[in-house]
Image: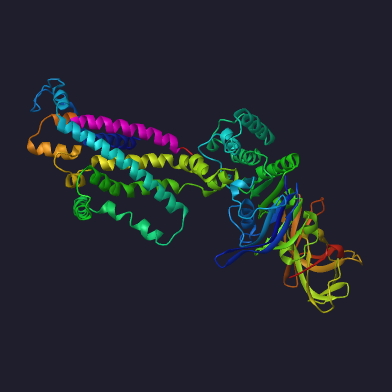
Amino acid sequence: MRRRIGLATLGRVYLALVLMFLYIPILVMAVMSFNASQFYTLPIDWSLRWYEALSGNSKLLNAGFNSIVVAVVTTAIASTLGTAAAIAFFRYEFRGKQVLQLLLFPPIAIPWLITGTAMLLFFFWAGIGRGLHAMVLGHVALALPYVIIVVSARLKAFDPDLEAAARSLGASPAQVVRHVTFPFIAPGFIAAALFAFAVSFDQFVISYFLAVPGVSTLPVEIYTAIRKGFTPEINAISTIVIVFSMTLLVGVARYYRFGGER
Amino acid sequence: MASVSVRDVSKLFGSFKALDDISIEFADGGFYGLLGPSGSGKTTLLRLIAGFDFPDSGEIEIGGEPVGALPAEKRDIGMMFQSYALFPNMSVFDNVAFGLMVRNTARAEIARRVGEALELVRLTGLDDRKPHQLSGGQRQRVALARAIVFHPRVLLLDEPLSALDKALRVGMQVELKRIQREIGITTIFVTHDQEEALTLSDRIGVLRDGRLVQEGAPKEIYDRPESAFAATFLGDANLFRGRANGDGVVLADGSRMRTADAPGKTGEEVVCAVRPERIEVVPADGPADGEGNKLDATVSEAIFAGNSMTYLASWQNQTVKVIAQNRGAEPFEAGARVRLVWRPADTVVVTP
């Protein structure tokens, strides 16, 4: 009995350590974004100074706006194309299907630095060049395998008889997709879309390669700003991004569990 | 309601002949059971009638009209799947309403007909439940209500009861038969369960290797199987091999057995089938009826099953199965010398 309590305590301590390891740096950053002092001096002098400074920093704000635009466009394209591909993989047998499915995985493992270099070279050669449009192309390519894999995983649990049943009940092919197939894969679709958004929103290396001076995304702009000299404005924008991401994730996690019920 | 005709239909999957020039007439309002082992083509035939697949040759007519390449959604056929295939994201009500919803039926009409259908399958008050909140039997009722709510011309059932446990299955057999009779819908169902086929159908087709080997009323097929396959697949049967001789058969050991119908040309090799419950076990020194068939055998196993006794008796390196009603008599024990007797009318000549 005594030993069991010991183990339970150990487990709790371990859990606490893991959470601390994960969240303390973020917490420190968030708290410091509200500290008027630039040099992290204690005690904290609470202030919104850096948020005010941020509101005047058009470079960071523009970059943030660009990030969102690129991520939203990437998400829309990658999750639509990826879901269609996953349904095709699920429904049809065709030559080269297995090779294609196998080829989905290497891009995840290839270092972004290499993918980024390859894309930069290829886009120049193909006349696509650099800029937000090139970033969207690059991000879609990165996000596609994630979308296909996540949606395919959901489809594995799909009973093809459901589509047959809907058809026998008189549903047209479009009605089958709308009322039966899509509602079933919706949780997977939302998770996949979130992946695509995160892949794009977090992307630094490829965005860095494909950015043109003056038009960049938030990670690239933060990196550039830090190299020039750190200001707590970075803490402020990072805190905003964290709150935004976490709200999104918590919302999705709740919906996902809800929709995942069978 | 409508009759269904299948004429000279063949279907290939690669080089595998799933259906081999099969023809069946399904009568209007009838309850037809397609019985066969897996791979016999029964599910393929059902899918062709439903319109999920199309025959390579031959023709299918529903209500006298050829359906040709008409897709499933335009055939007006209700189908119940083995897995039930209830839509997991929809409530009981929405599942049942689906066939009406895609036909743009008015909302009030949908509510009325869904209510009727659920009442017919005796499942009321669960409208808002999701399929995962229902028991197996309830799911089955939802699947049935969904398949009949839009008054289809034909109802197809694919192994309708195989997912239920035995106690529930027997109850549902009675229910299914009642519902079918009440709405009078032409029903075709597929099963590998001979008891289910016998209980539900008013007509049975026995399939093997994509062909129809025998067709008829359940009692007719059970009492007068035409082939050894039909005899053993639909119920139990003891098969005896011998040579035709006048109105009977001479077995390998020289004993003679009289048959229900003339066995064919004298000297020809024939097989006779005898149902286990038609054989009576009497003591070896018991009186022998001059008319009946008899074999002297030894009980090798006696299995008590409450309402009946199953005997396995050995005769000439062959095991003969006998099922005797438990009427209170002292059972024979293993090793006992016995005489097996039965009527010539229960000795059916079948093709090997």
Name the image quarter holding residue B176: top right
Inspect the magenta stretch and tell me whether residue B326 lies in it.
Answer: no
Q: Is residue A31 above or below residue B324?
A: above
Q: Position of residue B92 (x, y in %)?
A: 57, 34
Q: Position of residue B143 (x, y in %)?
A: 61, 41
Q: Is residue B92 above or below residue B229?
A: above
| Residue sticking out furthest to the right | B290
Q: How is the image coloured?
A: rainbow
- Residue drawn at x 55%, y 32% is B129
Name the image quarter holding residue B223: bottom right
Does the rendering let one see residue B192? yes
Dominant secondary structure of the residues highlighted in magenta in the image: helix
Q: Position of residue B198 (x, y in %)?
A: 74, 52
Magenta segment range? A237-260
Question: In the figure, is residue A11 to the left or right of B68?
Answer: left
Please name whichever residue, A253 or B167, is drawn nearer the observer in this view of the structure: A253
State the quadrant of the N terminus of chain A: top left
Q: Is residue B104 above or below residue A100?
A: above
Please name whichever residue, B190 or B266, is drawn nearer the observer in this view of the structure: B190
Question: In the figure, is residue B140 to the left or right of B343?
Answer: left
| Residue sticking out furthest to the bottom | B267
Does the rendering let one see residue B332? no
Q: Position of residue A211 (x, y in %)?
A: 18, 44
Inspect the magenta stretch and tell me whether residue A244 lies in it.
Answer: yes
Question: In the figure, is residue A188 to the left or right of B340?
Answer: left
| Residue sticking out furthest to the front | A127
